[in-house]
């Protein structure tokens, strides 16, 4: 399993490779030469799938895919190919061969994209692990349940709000 660790305020900490069967409680992040503590308590389900973030303990996680950086270039080229085909220039064998090659590259990108599991709270990313079916794609309502930072003490005041111009 590969973990791209992030702090509670979503800043990158570093990347670690570990064996989930060993369940190490602390790992050393090579980039910063610092130890990070991992919380494995109830982090794995009965089938060995990750159900909680080991970095922050959050229960909210979502699945996504990691596409290579060349994907944007392929999308732009596919759009250009669609325009060329719409204008009627796709009858040329060279253009047709280029469009077929572009289609093969596009399908290859989709086949070789890696599935990832991401924590809603700290955005730590987990890859190279089996992902359980109960993890869904990103959901805005679920993301609102896990804010990145706790509310400030000024917003938690229990005093009633004062109206402008009110005399005391």
Image: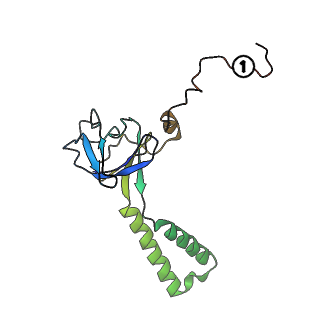
Q: How many marks can you see?
A: 1
| Colour option used | rainbow
At a point 34% along the width and 43% down the height, the residue shown is 133
Question: Compared to 54, does 18 lie above or below?
Answer: below
Residue 21's place in the image compared with 91, above or below, is: above
Q: Given the current orientation, which residue lies at the most extreme bottom position?
A: 93
User: At numbered mark 1, what does the secondary structure look like: helix, strand or loop?
Assistant: loop
Is 159 drawn above or below residue 55 in the view shown? above
x and y percentages locating residue 107 in the rendered image: 42, 67
Which residue lies under the disc numbered 1?
162
Q: Residue 91 vs residue 129: left or right?
A: right
The one of 83 and 40 positioned closer to us in this rendering: 40
Q: Nearer the viewer, residue 81 or 31?
A: 31
**145 in relation to 107, above or below:** above
Estimate the x, y position of residue 105 in percent, counting from the top left: 42, 72
In this view of the protein, can residue 125 be seen by the observer?
no
Q: Position of residue 32 (x, y in %)?
A: 34, 52
Q: Mark 1, residues whose alpha carbon is within 10 Å: few (<14), some, or many (≥20)?
A: few
Q: Residue at x 56, y 84 (%)?
A: 91
Q: Is residue 49 left or right of residue 106?
A: left
Q: Nearer the viewer, residue 35 or 114?
A: 35
Looking at this view, is 64 or 155 the one in front?
155
- Quarter that holds the C terminus: top right
Q: Residue at x 52, y 83 (%)?
A: 95
The outermost residue toward the right is 165
Residue at position x 81%, y 20% in the image: 165
């Amino acid at each position: 399993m590969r973990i791209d660790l992030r702090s509670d305020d979503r800043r990158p900490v570093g990347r670690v490779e570990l064996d989930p069967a060993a369940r190490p409680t602390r790992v050393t992040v090579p980039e910063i030469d610092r130890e990070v503590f991992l919380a494995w308590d109830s982090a794995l389900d009965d089938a060995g799938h990750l159900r909680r973030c080991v970095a922050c303990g959050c229960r909210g996680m979502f699945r996504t895919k990691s596409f290579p950086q060349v994907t944007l270039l392929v999308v732009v080229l596919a759009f250009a190919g669609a325009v060329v085909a719409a204008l009627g220039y796709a009858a040329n064998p060279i253009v047709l061969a280029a469009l077929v090659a572009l289609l093969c590259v596009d399908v290859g990108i989709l086949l070789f994209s890696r599935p990832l599991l991401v924590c809603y709270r700290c955005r730590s990313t987990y890859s190279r692990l089996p992902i359980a079916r109960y993890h869904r794609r990103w959901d805005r309502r679920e993301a609102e349940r896990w804010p990145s930072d706790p509310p400030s003490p000024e917003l938690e005041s229990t005093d009633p709000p004062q109206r402008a111009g009110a005399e005391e």
